[in-house]
Image (cartoon, grey):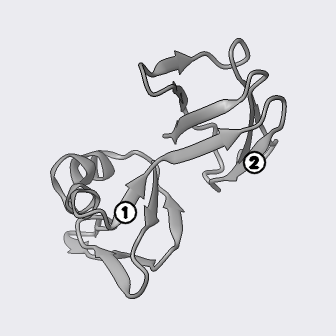
Amino acid sequence: MKITSLVSSGVLEFNDLGSYIKGVSPILRSIRLNAGASLYLVETSEVLLSAQSGDIYRFKAASKISVNDTLVLAAGVAQVLTHNFNFQPKVSVVKITGVSNTDYTANVDITLLHNVAFTTLSIASAAGGTFDVRLS
């Protein structure tokens, strides 16, 4: 999941993300997102809970962040997304048409190419259009 700050100044702090247990004590490290910055998050249970009812949900409802990538692709032109996961992410692509949104299938409707280190994803569509892309 990608989150992008839509605020023009300041820092958004996600207090429900980044905690972990070391020994018997929880250590809390919040994730901070500067104005205009983006961050790809691996969809762990804490990220999904935050999106459902936590800080991600709250900031999205207040129009302070956007979630996922919305790409406008020209026909046959690839765009590269840098996620730095270091493993193969699950990729969901939906074509946004305005009337109804359509799930796209990798290498049938759209071309997806991962680099060897699994840190980037190249995405292209033969027909072009506007797409919602989610990496998890």
Q: Is residue 133 left or right of residue 121?
A: left
The mark lying in front, picked from 2 and 1, is 1
Residues tagged 2 and 1 counted as in contact (Cβ below 8 A): no
Residue 105: quarter of image: top right
Q: Is residue 123 left or right of residue 87?
A: right
10 Å crowding of disc 1: few (<14), some (14-19), many (20+): many
The Cα atoms of the two marked residues, 2 and 1, are separated by: 21 Å
Counting from the top left corner in percent of width and height, residue 130 is at: 59, 35
Q: Is residue 78 left or right of residue 63?
A: right
Mark 2 or mark 1: name the one nearer the start of the chain: 1
Q: Is residue 26 above or below residue 76?
A: below
10 Å crowding of disc 2: few (<14), some (14-19), many (20+): few
Can you name the residue that lies furthest to the top here?
108
Q: Write down the residue under mark 2.
A: 80
Residue at 75% over, 48% down: 80
Disc 2 marks a residue whose amino acid type is Val
Residue at 49% over, 18% down: 102
Q: Is residue 111 above or below residue 89?
A: above
Residue at 42% over, 69% down: 6
Can you name the residue that lies furthest to the bottom here?
10
**Residue in front for this viewpoint, 105 or 16:** 105
* Badge 2 element: strand
Disc 1 marks a residue whose amino acid type is Ile
- Asked if one can make out residue 29 in the rendered structure from this viewpoint, the answer is no
Residue at 27% over, 76% down: 28
**Residue in front for this viewpoint, 92 or 29:** 92
- Asked if one can make out residue 59 in the rendered structure from this viewpoint, the answer is yes
Counting from the top left corner in percent of width and height, residue 125 is at: 74, 26
Disc number for residue 65: 1
